[in-house]
Amino acid sequence: MSYAVCVAAGHRFRWFRHGGSAVAQYLRQELHGLFESVHKSHIPELFLWIKEIGGYFKRFRGGALAPWIHDTEGKPEMDLEARATQTFFEVGALLKPFINFAHFLIT
């Protein structure tokens, strides 16, 4: 069975049905750019999407993204943990047709 692993917020997230070689190639080529381009102003809308996923994420309180969930103005810049967490979810939103967040295993 194929699976992909992503490390975010100090956890290893592993999901099955990750989209195969096309998604793996896309991430190999684009993940670094996505990591560098995330912006805290997208977090409130992203957090709403995260809550809609359900399962584990229904109970998700924001983790490293918590300072920016409701308001981003006047808040500090994101650290690496927040940037990695946001990138993880942004990739999930971008690749939603190819992966299934409902099958996450948190290790």
Image (cartoon, rainbow, N blue to C red):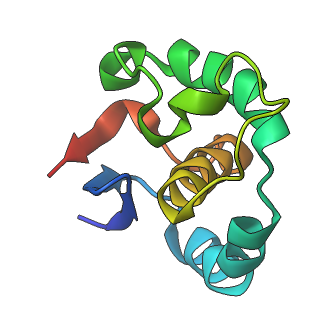
Give the residue displayed 52% in from the left and 47% down from the top: 99
Q: In the displayed structure, does residue 46 sit left or right of residue 15?
A: right
Using the image, determine if residue 74 lies above or below residue 32. Answer: above
Query: Is residue 56 or residue 84 the one in the foreground?
Result: 84
* Side of 97 relative to 73 (left or right): left
Q: Quadrant of residue 83?
A: bottom right
Q: Is residue 34 above or below residue 49?
A: below
- The residue shown at (54%, 65%) is 80
Q: Residue at x 56, y 14 (%)?
A: 52
Q: Position of residue 17 (x, y in %)?
A: 41, 53
Location of the N terminus by quadrant is bottom left
Foreground pick, 39 / 15: 39
Place of residue 48 in the rendered image (x, y in percent of width and height, measured from the top left): 65, 16
Q: Is residue 1 left or right of residue 49?
A: left
Of residues 106 and 23, the one drawn nearer to the viewer in this rendering: 106
Give residue 94's position: percent from left, percent from top. 73, 48
Return the x and y of residue 2 as percentages of the image width and height: 31, 67
Q: How many numbered circles does the render carry?
A: 0
Please report the residue visible at 55 percent of the width from the left and 37 percent of the height from the top. Answer: 65
Q: Is residue 23 above or below residue 106?
A: below
Along the viewing direction, whichever of 95 and 44 lies nearer the viewer = 44
